[in-house]
Image (tube, coloured by chain):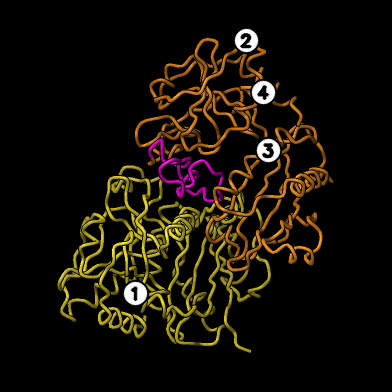
Chain colours: A yellow, B orange
């Protein structure tokens, strides 16, 4: 039988190092279909935790170092204990080893603040075969702009709003996608309350003007995009300059092509923005997806 | 042995009524210490669900109808199935019956969107004896104002931001309280990006000017406060007028007294606002807490 998903529980050390010693192994592979979380876990009651998701190509996690750095940055923003990189690397490897290798899988790593009052974080790594994203990567996405409600500089002025941390509190991100569907769109680009392009609910905005690849930021309280970073590393050797830019929705509509990029769906071209048609750059889209699929950490 | 907490799993009907029939009883009392949630539950991975918390005085849930109405309003905001009020009433009663009655307990009810792709919500009711809130109710709270980042009218302009719904995505609410502690405060009052007093992370703002009791709102994208509503019902027979008001932090500092009110901690006087001392109205505080503790649904 095809093993298409797996789960590894991660026994992240607590603030009390001695407590960790008696708690057994750092991680263990468990039955993915059994319940493993208490209803008192702060992941479930407060969305009080962090996650990250990386693609796995033929059994190899991609941009692993970057994902672990971002996971650590999210932990710092939420004042969680720093994730032990070696423990998480081993857990990710164990989760990957427990599914049959296919061209495209993904691993989601999660760390919550644990059960309220317990002081010990809850951690897990979940691995599964990826859905088929061929339609999104070829036909492309109809995208709606939606107000994120926050100013573009809120990460600087109000760090407790956790802008730029990948938290488990994603109810708004999901509500935004439902609103997009009501507007006959497939996905969303959030706009700051003062009118600047931010990011998608689960993706980074990328666009092209001539031979320049651009992305919003930095300093906008948005996620440090791992896929966008991989593309910016690739670009100079392939005839493209790269640039961060504070952009408005109108600037994005005037781009030669635009994409939403993310770790698992990879590079999905935008075919319309609030109903305005966008040109698809099929050649560059294919080139980028081939590169990302072939990339190994 | 004192039974101090209990857990009831709620088998909320899915969109497919037939599926519900084969799934067994509407609710069941389970071991509170065992794991009951999948790591794929959207409560844990996306904070994608709703909750409400009510106090239980000597075994009687307080303001039950109001809490169930608010729970249903939160479900509507997140486009979850309407909670079946009769099922939830029975589950709440079962959770209460499974703990030894004391003067103050609470029940927390939660409904998530369930496991991604499954279509069936996950629900539970958790009952436990309340902590002793005497210090908060008598000594009072030092409160910091913190920017909520959102305009006061965002519930009208941008409903996908879910302002005013009691969602499981509370990471920001918890980060705000950590920021308050850094500022030598105990709790927070959020202020809109355009300068209006909103609410606490887990409470409603109440203040007194002469013989008028006031609260921010309505239409500010804040929670419909069940405790504030109970107090507004009590007020006219006890010599107080009540009013909703769009208030600034300065207006709150000039009030004769101010409180943070919530279902379990009840009425906690504010003894300072951003370092400015506030007068405590001990008599009214005690009067309100006595009334709320005696109230039965």
Q: Nearer the viewer, residue B108 or B274?
A: B108
N-term-proximal mark, 4 vs 3: 3
Q: Label 2, label 4: how many angstroms apart (C-alpha)? A: 17 Å
Q: Which residues are magenta?
A: B151-178
Q: What label sits on residue B54 in the rendered view?
A: 3
Q: Which label sits in the foreground, 3 or 1? A: 1
Q: Residue at x 66, y 17 (%)?
A: B287
Could you tell me which secondary element the residue under label 4 belongs to? helix
Residue at the (27%, 68%) spot, across then down: A278
Q: Is residue A249 above or below residue A91?
A: above
- The disc placed on residue B239 is 2
**Which chain is mark 1 on?**
A
**Chain under label 3?**
B
What label does residue B289 carry, if any?
Answer: 4
Residue B135 appears anywhere in the view: no
Q: CA–CA distance between discs 3 and 1? A: 46 Å
């Amino acid at each position: 039988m095809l093993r298409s998903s797996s789960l590894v529980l991660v026994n992240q050390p607590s603030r009390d190092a001695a407590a960790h010693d008696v708690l057994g192994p750092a991680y263990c592979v468990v039955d993915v279909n059994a319940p493993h979380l208490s209803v008192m876990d702060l992941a479930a009651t407060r969305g009080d935790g962090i996650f990250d998701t990386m693609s796995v190509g033929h059994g190899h996690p991609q941009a692993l170092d970057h994902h672990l750095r971002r996971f650590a940055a999210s932990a710092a923003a939420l004042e969680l204990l720093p994730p032990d990189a070696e423990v998480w690397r081993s857990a990710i490897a164990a989760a990957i080893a427990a599914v049959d290798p296919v061209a495209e899988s993904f691993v989601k790593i999660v760390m919550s603040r644990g059960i309220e009052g317990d002081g010990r974080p809850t951690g897990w790594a979940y691995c599964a075969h990826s859905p088929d994203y061929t339609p999104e990567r070829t036909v492309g996405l109809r995208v709606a702009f939606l107000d994120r409600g926050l100013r573009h500089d809120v990460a600087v002025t109000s760090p407790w709003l956790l802008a730029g941390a990948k938290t488990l509190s994603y109810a708004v991100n999901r509500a935004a996608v439902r609103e997009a569907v009501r507007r006959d769109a497939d996905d969303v680009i959030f706009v700051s309350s003062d009118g600047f392009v931010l990011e998608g609910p689960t993706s980074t905005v990328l666009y092209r003007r001539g031979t320049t690849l651009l992305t919003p930021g930095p300093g906008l309280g948005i996620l440090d995009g791992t896929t966008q970073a991989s593309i910016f590393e690739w670009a100079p050797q392939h005839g493209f300059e790269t640039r961060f830019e504070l952009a408005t929705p109108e600037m994005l509509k005037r781009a030669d092509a635009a994409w939403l990029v993310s770790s698992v769906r990879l590079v999905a071209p935008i075919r319309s923005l609030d109903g305005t048609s966008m040109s698809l750059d099929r050649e560059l889209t294919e080139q980028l997806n081939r590169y990302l699929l072939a990339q190994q950490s």
